[in-house]
Amino acid sequence: MQSYLSLQQFLLNIQGKLKYSFPESYWIKAELAGVRKVGKHVYFELIQLSSGQKVAQIRGTAFHAEGTQAISEFEMTTGQKFADGIKIGLRATVNYHPVYGLSLNLLELDAELTIGGIELQRKQTLEQLLLKNPGVIMLRDGLYSTPNKLLPIPLAIQRVAVITSLSSDAFADFMHCLKTNDHDYHFYTDIYEALVHGYSTTISIMAAMDQILASGKKYDVVVLIRGGGAPADFLPFDDYDLALRVATFSIPIVTGIGHQMNQGIADFFARIHMKTPTMAAQYMIDYNAQFESRLYLLSESINKIALALYVSRNNQFLMLQSKIVSITKGALQNKTFQLFQVESNLVPSVFRVLKNEALKLEQKSLQISFRLPFYFTAMQKNLLHLQEHIQSLSPQRLLKRGFVLIKKNGTYVVNEKLNPGEAIEIIQETSIYQAEIIKKL
């Protein structure tokens, strides 16, 4: 005859043996899943994955007081919600209940393990960015080189695109610092609002970057700012896609996203990294102040060089003026003496020339007086000959010699073709005839 145990007795026996075998608490590393709050208690699953496959799983409970207090301290220290998907280190005791089965009771959480996981994830993301983007993202002597880091910043920063949340204290601090700067610099700022906390941060920031490019405005820099927080709050700024976008963005980016202890990947890849929004604003103020200082020093240098050049050229001018006066006086004296000599030689020469020209004029006058009668006689003969020639060509002379004149339509015909049927007048010395062209021969 078999001896049976009730199910309850059997499970209570297991409970006792487990409690005897695992009397203490144990530190365990696992991944959270199925987190839910029921009343004042928090229930969850602990899982372990290998090559994407679940290889271990157990239920866990954080009872009100010790367990839930550990969760609150964990969230405050890390800034990370006690939520699905994060890796945690916890101290727990083994618990077995005849109804609810095997589970772990959470006593304490290791915040440093989770923070270390964040650093490990950042390291892995950086390695992937370097591996998949050769020639774009490079690591040299411990410093990252990206296209954005190589972009020139204008001599003075004036036009600024700001990516941030309008409701954040970071934005208020940033604008206050810009507007109350000691140099009275004025910055033209356009705000592109985006989420800077939570899981949608990455998508929201990249959408704002798209809006900046689509605006077509020529910004000097883009400023990405948010307030401080726990390490987990900065996870979106370690995102692969956002980091790559920052690295290759076509406008210089200045970050001030609240890292107090370290830098995120977005900071590594941006043109300028500052720890806080206020420091980002102060960087732009100081940058412009340096430019103004260079202008002032250049102005002083120009003034000094100009003054020295003026003194040098003025001295040269005075020396040249004195030399010119001396040379001019000597030249005037020399030319005055030469003029006196020319004058003394010129007067007799002029009289001789005038006398010779007078003799020539007198000779020409005698020649003209002698030749003039012969000239008039020759001209009279030419005129008579011309008159006779003209008279010989008169129409009356031609008609007397038997020639006729022809008119058509009241006009004399000269070398004009006449056609059959045309009416003409034939003029003789004493008669005029009406005629018609019959035929052309």
Image (cartoon, rainbow, N blue to C red):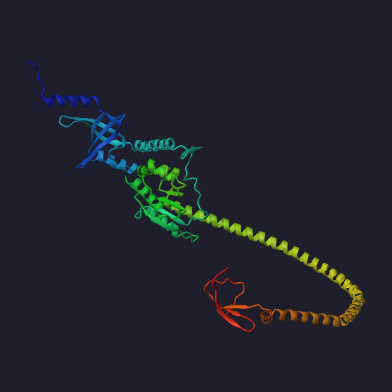
The quadrant holding residue 259 is: top left
Judged left or right of residue 345, residue 156 is left
Front residue of 408/169: it is 408
Front residue of 205/116: it is 205
Q: Can residue 264 be seen in this view?
A: no
**Residue 37, how many percent across, how many down?**
22, 41
Residue that sits furthest to the bottom in the current view: 430
Residue drawn at (63%, 84%) of the image: 430
Q: Is residue 372 above or below residue 332?
A: below
* Quadrant showing the N terminus: top left
The quadrant holding residue 436 is: bottom right
Q: In this view, does 244 lie above or below 360?
A: above
**Residue 202, how many percent across, how many down?**
35, 45
Judged left or right of residue 374, residue 309 is left
Q: Is residue 366 visible?
A: yes
* Quadrant showing the C terminus: bottom right
Front residue of 94/143: it is 143
**Residue 68, how many percent across, how many down?**
25, 40
Residue drawn at (86%, 71%) of the image: 335
Judged left or right of residue 56, residue 377 is right
Front residue of 163/336: it is 336
Residue that sits furthest to the top in the current view: 1
